[in-house]
Image: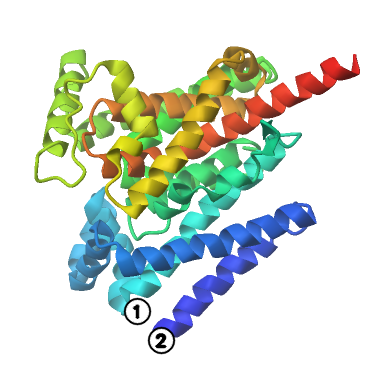
Amino acid sequence: MDFLFATVFVLLGYLFVISFKRKLSQSNLTTLKQLYFYHLLFGIYYYFFVFGDSIGYWRQAKLMTFDTFLHSFKEEQGTYFMYALNYIPSNILDLSYFTGTIMYSVIGFIGLAYFYVTAIDTITTNPKFKGYNLFPVLFFLPNLHFWSCAVGKDTLLFFCIGIFIYGVMNPTKRILFIILALSLSYVVRPHITLFMIISFGFAFIANNNKSIFQRVLFTSIMIGIAVSIFPLVLKFSKIEEATLDNFNNFALTKASLLSKSYTSSAIDVSSYPFPIKVFTFLFRPFFFDINSIPSLLAAIENMILLVLTISVFRNKPLTTFRKAPFVIQGMVYFLLIGTFAFSQSLGNLGIMIRMRNMFLPGLIIFLFWHFSSQNNEEINNTSD
């Protein structure tokens, strides 16, 4: 039974890839296939060598009673909802944790595929840095796959963000993508839902290519959703009142708990100045943090991202940002909000890099856009 379901999940993932046959060029479709099998390898690696929360999400679901399942599915958010979500495959179908990992790997890849397609739809020419193609190379960065293949919240949120971004590019035809993304992310981590609404709502409002009617309508809908879920976000985060002092105390408490000496890869960020907190969230572990092969790979990846980001800041980043399609602007706002929020409250490199993975595609796609724009300018200046 396990082997059958694992095979079915893999085949469904491959059929999903093939579904882009008419939309993508042959070379881009081939790359998407490579990304799929590359992603599955990370899922297999995660199953054999990483022992974390994902095991608990699967095993606890096996222990649930039906009544507990119904209550958790209808009433709970976060961890207990995750147990309920895994109840049918883990408990009813009695599938193994390995099959569950394969299933979640396919789900995470679906999110990645929509990021990939979004990049193709928005970037007109292949971006280059020092003569080297950035697309699709940056989509093979290890951590982009490592944290989106495990049983757990991170994979589901990666999926939600991917389909949401794809959906807002054509909201009238892809409204179901948007509804699914917002609904699922809300019951997994409601503050991420709020971040998405604020980020893309603001990007849509500021987009001069949209009619005033569209902007007013979209703004009204986004404000209505944001206002309705904001009290629930505070409740989920256990913040009694939306004041600066309460948010600051929440951040300090969270950072303190996650920087205890018994916490693996813990660091004390509470005394860091704001710029160092941001650097820590976006670009660590760095070479001075290396203590294993995975941290070495992460450090190399972060160095690449840091070099590219520095190059962006040295070459008119605001100009290229203003020219970007609203979906890329939304991803940048999402990256900025997420970085501001999590860089203040996390004190563990492992958790930081997991959280950062939700925002990493936005950084990567903006890098594509920036260098593509720069390359086009250079070509135009040369032809003149």
Q: Distance between the residues labelled 2 and 1?
A: 9 Å
Lower sequence index among marks 2 and 1: 2
Q: Quadrant of residue 271?
A: top left
Depth check, mark 2 against mark 1: the one in front is 2
Quarter of the image for the N terminus: give it: bottom left
Q: Quadrant of residue 372?
A: top right
Residue, far left: 261
**How many residues crowd mark 1 within 10 Å: few (<14), some (14–19), many (20+)?**
few
Could you tell me which secondary element the residue under label 2 belongs to? loop
Residue 222 in view in this figure: no
What residue sits right under mark 1 in the picture?
93
Residue shown at 28% from the left, 60% from the top: 54
Residue shown at 51% from the left, 20% from the top: 202
Residue 207 lies, with reference to residue 331, above or below; the image says above
Residue 106 lies, with reference to residue 241, above or below; the image says below
Q: Identify which amino acid the numbered label 1 is placed on.
A: Leu
Q: In this view, does 152 lie to the left or right of 63?
A: right
What residue sits right under mark 2 in the picture?
1
